Structures are given as structure tokens and as C-alpha cells.
């Protein structure tokens, strides 16, 4: 494989706190090893539109503590077409870029996998999504911050739940995965959690709530992942209210605040480690892999596995919610 000399970096899919720390790490590590670094603005669409600019160390100064992504992000329909990917490749060639780092989630790596099969551009992925639903890495960049944001919001809601003896259904992000919901539920001492991976009958949930939401308890909190099959927080709240009109039920949807804000130290450090390791891997002739962190060790997982395998939710932790809600 020819020696890597010019490394492009882009962010793709939903933004996640810590992406900026990853960009900084990629750019500075590339420059440290005497390579040129290029920022591609607006994800794969930016590659197609030739929105590509050389970056110096100062372009990534003072960005570590900011949420979002200085490179912007997008979901590109055009990159899903062979014509779009060909344009992207031609633009990379035009700039002499000979390697790529993609910071994003599952969908972004599906694109990267196809692209690196079609063209001779070694590509390495860095997992960035608040959802944490990526095979091969214990945590994704942004997950820790999102859970902390949700936890802080729920701590506040619990004051009202407790003051009024109310039952709250709180919806957190997670269209296809319940990682945010489950961890947040443990961290906030919730009575129950509803996730997309497992269906719960309303009757069963009601039994559980009836057990927990009794006069000896001052409040009840149920965490609902947005993709849970019960119809989100409002859907399940309505069903429960029909069965128990005496409950004082309220809903709160936390929404996009979970995607933004200052990354936690855990996300900054994770992003920095993965960014450095991504460039190291490219200089070590690796390609078509995602860099992850498993059991506190840097790991390299082939794109094939990352996109074809599904990370399962820890069922023991689900059971913990039941045990700890007594
Ligand atoms: O970043 C992941 C995620 O937060 C999902 O949990 C959510 O369903 C989705 O993004 C929504 O993102 P968008 O509105 O950008 O499509």
C-alpha cells in the first residue's frame, strides 16, 4: 500500500458531543506525523460538493469543550448512489487525499464500507453517536454526555414528581436502541424502563407500577426510549391512565438537548484516544476498520462486523431496574 500523506476527516450522521475532540485528535496526530490534514465539511455530501479544506493545528484550537461538530454533519442520499460515490472519490483524488477518517454511527460506516470496497482509499471509522448502538466498542463518543444530560434533567423532574406524588413518563433518545434509556434509568433510580429491544405488555408495566407507585413511595419515574414500541412517553402514559385514572400522570420528552452541550471528560478522553488511534492505524496500513474501546483497550474491528452485527442490550442491567425499584 502506498504511504499515507494526506488524511481527510469528516463527521457524518447525527452530531454527538465529543466529535470536536475527535476531529482535533485526528488533525493534530496527522500533522505530528508530518502528514497533511483536510477537513471535509458537511459529511459525505461535502465530499461530493468538494467542500474540502486543509486544516492546521490552529483550526482545531479551543474546540475540545464544544458540542456539535465544527465540520458540520449531514445524512447524504447522494452518497448512497454509485454516481455520488464516484464524485466523492474524484474530489479526494483532486486534493491528493489518500486516506480518510469517518467519525459517525452505523449508517456512516455502511457508507464507508461500500466506498472503501469500490475505491482505493483506506478508510478508518471512529464511533460517534449518542445512541451507543455500535458493535465492537463499549461506548461511543457522545453517549456519556447524553446520559449525564438526561440524568441531570430527570433529577430536576424528580423534585416535582416527589412534591406532587406524580407518576412521570420521561422520554429519552434512542430510535432503535435502549442504551441511553437503560443507563439513565439505573442512574436515576427509575421504577421501570421501556426500550425498543424488548416489548412490555401494558398490563405487566401497570402491575409493576402498581407495586412501586404506592403510598409508601413519594414519586414514580418510568424512562421510555423514543423507539420503544409502546408509542413513546405519551403513548404509554395514555394507556396507563386508562387503566389507572387515579394516578396523577405527567410526561416529559427530553429531546435534542441530549445531543448537544459540553462533552464530559469521559467523552473528551475517549474521542482523543480514538482519534489518535485512527491515524496510527492508517499509517500502519490498516483500512476498512473501526477503532473502538473494549475493556479499556483500543481495538480494531472490521467494518463488515461493525455494520452486520448488533450490539445487544445487557439483560442483567434490565433486571437490575426491577430489583432496585423495590
Ligand atoms: O443521534 C442518534 C439519534 O439521537 C436517535 O436516537 C434519534 O432518533 C435520531 O438521532 C434523530 O436524529 P435526527 O433528527 O437528526 O434524524
Image (cartoon, rainbow, N blue to C red):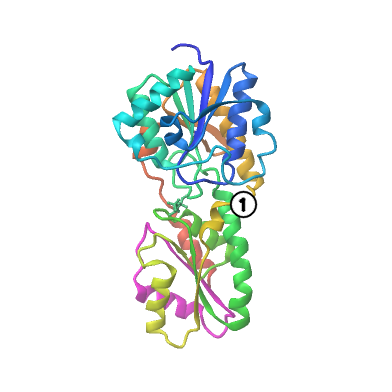
Q: Which residues are magenta?
A: 192-221
**Looking at the image, is 16 positioned above or below residue 224?**
above
The residue at the far top in this view is: 2
Question: Quarter of the image holding residue 119?
Answer: top left
Residue 237 coordinates in the image, percent (x, y): 43, 75
Q: Is 130 in the magenta?
A: no
Q: Is residue 276 above or below residue 295?
A: above
The local crowd at label 1, few if under 14, some if 14 to 19, many if 20 or more residues have their Cα within 10 Å, is some
Q: Residue at x 41, y 46 (%)?
A: 311
Q: Position of residue 287 (x, y in %)?
A: 43, 23
Q: Quadrant of the N terminus?
A: top left
Q: Is residue 98 visible?
A: no
Q: Quadrant of residue 135?
A: top left
Does residue 294 appear left or right of residue 195 in this picture? right
SS assignment at label 1: loop
- From where the camera sits, is residue 35 visible? yes
Looking at this view, name the residue that lies furthest to the bottom. Answer: 246
- Between 320 and 303, the residue placed more toward the observer is 303
Q: Which residue is mark 1?
A: 261
Q: Residue at x 35, y 29 (%)?
A: 85
- What percent of the width, then of the height, locates residue 3? 50, 12
223 or 226, nearer to the observer: 226
Amino acid at each position: 500500500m502506498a504511504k499515507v500523506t494526506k488524511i481527510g476527516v469528516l463527521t457524518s450522521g447525527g452530531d454527538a458531543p465529543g466529535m470536536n475532540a475527535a476531529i482535533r485528535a485526528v488533525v493534530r496526530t496527522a500533522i505530528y506525523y508530518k502528514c497533511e490534514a483536510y477537513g471535509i465539511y458537511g459529511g459525505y455530501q461535502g465530499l461530493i460538493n468538494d467542500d474540502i479544506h486543509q486544516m492546521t493545528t490552529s483550526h482545531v484550537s479551543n474546540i475540545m469543550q464544544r458540542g456539535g461538530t465544527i465540520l458540520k454533519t449531514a445524512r447524504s442520499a447522494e452518497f448512497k448512489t454509485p454516481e455520488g460515490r464516484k464524485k466523492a472519490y474524484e474530489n479526494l483524488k483532486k486534493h491528493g487525499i489518500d486516506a480518510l477518517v469517518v467519525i459517525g454511527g452505523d449508517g456512516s460506516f455502511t457508507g464507508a464500507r461500500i466506498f472503501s470496497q469500490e475505491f482505493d482509499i483506506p478508510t478508518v471509522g471512529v464511533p460517534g453517536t449518542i445512541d451507543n448502538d455500535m458493535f465492537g466498542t463499549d461506548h461511543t463518543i457522545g453517549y456519556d454526555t447524553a446520559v449525564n444530560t438526561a440524568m441531570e434533567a430527570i433529577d430536576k423532574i424528580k423534585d416535582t414528581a416527589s412534591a406532587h406524588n406524580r407518576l412521570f413518563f420521561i422520554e429519552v433518545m434512542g430510535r432503535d436502541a435502549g442504551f441511553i434509556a437503560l443507563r439513565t434509568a439505573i442512574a436515576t433510580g427509575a421504577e421501570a424502563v421501556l426500550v425498543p429491544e424488548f416489548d412490555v405488555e401494558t398490563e405487566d408495566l401497570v402491575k409493576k407500577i402498581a407495586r412501586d407507585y404506592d403510598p409508601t413511595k413519594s414519586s414514580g419515574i418510568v424512562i421510555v426510549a423514543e423507539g420503544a414500541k409502546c408509542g413513546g412517553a405519551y403513548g404509554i402514559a395514555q394507556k396507563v391512565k386508562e387503566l389507572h385514572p387515579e394516578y396523577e400522570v405527567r410526561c416529559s420528552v427530553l429531546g435534542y438537548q441530549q445531543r448537544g452541550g459540553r462533552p464530559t471528560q469521559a467523552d473528551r478522553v475517549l474521542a482523543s484516544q480514538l482519534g489518535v488511534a485512527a491515524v496510527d492505524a492508517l499509517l500502519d496500513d490498516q483500512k476498512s476498520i473501526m477503532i473502538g474501546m473494549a475493556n479499556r483497550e483500543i481495538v480494531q474491528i472490521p467494518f463488515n462486523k461493525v455494520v452486520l452485527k448488533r450490539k445487544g442490550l445487557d439483560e442483567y442491567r434490565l433486571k437490575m431496574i426491577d430489583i432496585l425499584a423495590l
